[in-house]
Image (cartoon, grey):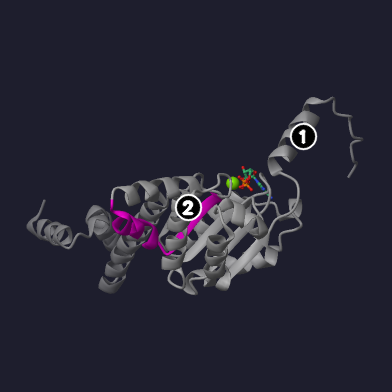
Amino acid sequence: MNLLLERLHSALVTLQLSEADALLENHLEGAVQQERTYADFLCLLLEAEVEARRTRALAARMRMAALPSPKRLSQFDFAFQPSIDERQVRELATLRFVSDASNIILLGPPGVGKTHLAVALAVEAIAGGNSVSFVTAHDLTTDLGRAAREGRLETRLRRYLKPKVLVIDEVGYLPLDTVGATIFFQLVSARYERGSIILTSNKSYSDWGQVFGETTIASAILDRLLHHATTINIRGESYRLKERRKAGLLSAPVKAEPTKTA
Ligand code: ADP
Ligand code: MG
């Protein structure tokens, strides 16, 4: 390797420009062959570094989010669930809710796409450069309950306060005891007007008293949660049932359709 190249590599490594370092020879050769200007060469090399960093950061945010599956908005069949206003979901996907620190509450029976939409909006938020964390209500209250017993609730809460968007899935499947409900309230209060929550629940708001054990704490939680929030109430059939039905239909004999002539 000639001395100049060695110095270049060493400088790029010191500056932690690893992509530029890896591409250096290639780009130098390309610049000679294509008779690129100095500015053109430098621009291409640095842009490759920027792009690689962006991709790495996106992958890191996806990992950190711990999404159950990377569902996308493009995979959601709005025609199947007419109770959902597609325009409203598209507006949410612009991520204004993230900068406003407002919340999204998805309500409805099992299988109607609550988790799918929550995850899809989370993926949009990640793509938009935001930190996201996904947790089920059960895991959240178990984790924070343990921390409270061990006298480190404050520290542990930070894990759920840090991300710009916190997805809390399946609120209401399991009722919470008073400690769980109090911890949940603390979390919602601490995130209030500071960071968004995307929450899914199979229980309508009127049943939240049951979920949180008593109506006082449930209304205190709802008060903060709903002050700046969009509620999407999904009514309709379970997509899982539809898929099962479709599978059943497919195994039945299919009547041959007349072939169309052009
Ligand atoms: P919920 O959280 O409401 O119980 P999910 O979001 O887990 O339901 O949806 C169940 C399954 O059906 C998932 O695999 C999801 O991707 C799929 N699904 C639900 N609704 C739709 C839809 N409208 N279009 C496409 N897939 C859907
Ligand atoms: Mg779900």
Residue beneath disc 1: 245
Across and down, in percent, residue 185 comes to 47, 61
Across and down, in percent, residue 46 comes to 29, 66
User: What amino acid is at disc 2?
Assistant: Thr
Across and down, in percent, residue 202 comes to 64, 50
Q: Please report contact status of discs 1 and 2: CB closer than 8 Å, yes or no.
A: no
Q: Where residue 148 is drawn, which disc sits there?
A: none
**Residue 52 in view here:** no
The answer as to whether callout 2 falls within 8 Å of ligand 2 is no
Across and down, in percent, residue 58 comes to 40, 56
Q: Is residue 191 left or right of residue 175?
A: left
Q: CA distance from mark 1 to mark 2?
A: 41 Å
Q: Secondary structure at mark 2?
A: helix
Residue 258 lies in what quarter of the image? top right
Q: Is residue 199 left or right of residue 182?
A: right
Task: Give 69 or 194, whichever is nearer the viewer.
Answer: 194
Residue placed furthest toward the left = 3
As for residue 131 lying within the magenta part, the answer is no
Q: Secondary structure at mark 1?
A: helix
Mark 1 or 2, which is nearer the eye?
A: 2
Residue beneath disc 2: 178
Query: In the rendered view, would you say 152 is above or below 86?
Result: above
Q: Which tag, 1 or 2, sits closer to the chain's start? A: 2
Task: Report the span colored magenta.
Answer: 151-170
Residue 94 lies in what quarter of the image? bottom right
